[in-house]
Amino acid sequence: MLPSPNGAAISAAARSVLVLDGSLRPSIEDLIGAGAVIEALGLPCSPEAVITGEIFCSVRSRLRELLRSCVSGQELINRGYAQDVEVAIDLNTSIAAPLLENCAYIG
C-alpha cells in the first residue's frame, strides 16, 4: 500500500465498513485498477463494470506511461516513492488485497 492524501482520511473515517479503496479525487489509477480487477475476475458485469473493464483493456499496453505521468503517480514519485509506483503498476503479482479491519490494513 502506498501513502495517499485522500486514502488516509477515508481510512480514518471508515470504522465499521468493509474498505478496499476510496478516493475524494477521481483518478485514472482507480478506474484502471478497477477495470483490471473486473477483467481478471471474468464474471458477468453491469454495464458500468463492462465499460470500466474495456477502459483497462484499451490502455493496458500504456500502463507504465499513463500511471507514471498521472497526478497521483507524479505526487508519489516526487515524494520519493518512484519504486512503489513501479511495483503498483505490475499486473498479476499480488494474490490478496488489503482489508481495513479495526483501523488497520491487513493483507
Image (cartoon, rainbow, N blue to C red):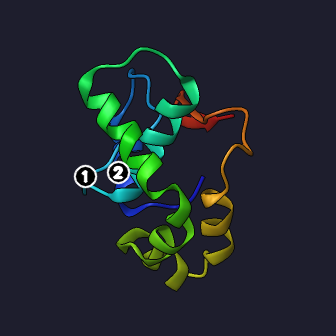
Q: Which residue is drawn at 53% across and 22% down?
A: 42
- Does residue 42 appear left or right of residue 88 in this picture? left
Query: Which residue is label 2 attached to?
Result: 9
Query: Which of 4 and 14 lies nearest the eye of the viewer?
Result: 4
Q: Give residue 43's mark.
A: none
Q: Where is residue 85 in the image (x, y as percent from the top left)?
A: 60, 67
Q: Which residue is drawn at 41% across and 42% down?
A: 11
Q: What residue type is labelled 1?
A: Leu
| 94 in relation to 47, above or below | below
Q: What residue type is labelled 2?
A: Ala
The Cα–Cα distance between marks 2 and 1, rounded to whole angstroms, is 9 Å
SS under mark 2? helix
Q: Is residue 104 visible?
A: yes
Say which quadrant the C terminus sits in.
top right
Q: Position of residue 65 (x, y in %)?
A: 51, 74
Q: Position of residue 44 (x, y in %)?
A: 41, 14
Q: How crowded is mark 2: few (under 14 residues within 10 Å), some or many (20 or more)?
A: few
Query: Which residue is label 1 attached to?
Result: 24
| 37 in relation to 64, above or below | above
Residue 99 occupies quadrant: top right
Query: Which of 86 and 57 lies nearest the eye of the viewer?
Result: 57
Q: Which of marks 2 and 1 is in front?
A: 1
Quick check: marks 2 and 1 in contact, CB under 8 Å?
yes
Q: Which residue is drawn at 36% across and 19% down?
A: 45
Q: Residue at x 25, y 25 (%)?
A: 47
- Does residue 68 appear left or right of residue 49 in this picture? right
Q: Which residue lies furthest to the bottom in this view?
A: 78
Query: Which of 18 and 82 lies nearest the eye of the viewer?
Result: 82
Q: How crowded is mark 1: few (under 14 residues within 10 Å), some or many (20 or more)?
A: few
Query: Which of 34 and 106 lies nearest the eye of the viewer?
Result: 34
Q: Can residue 103 be seen in this view?
A: no
SS under mark 1? loop
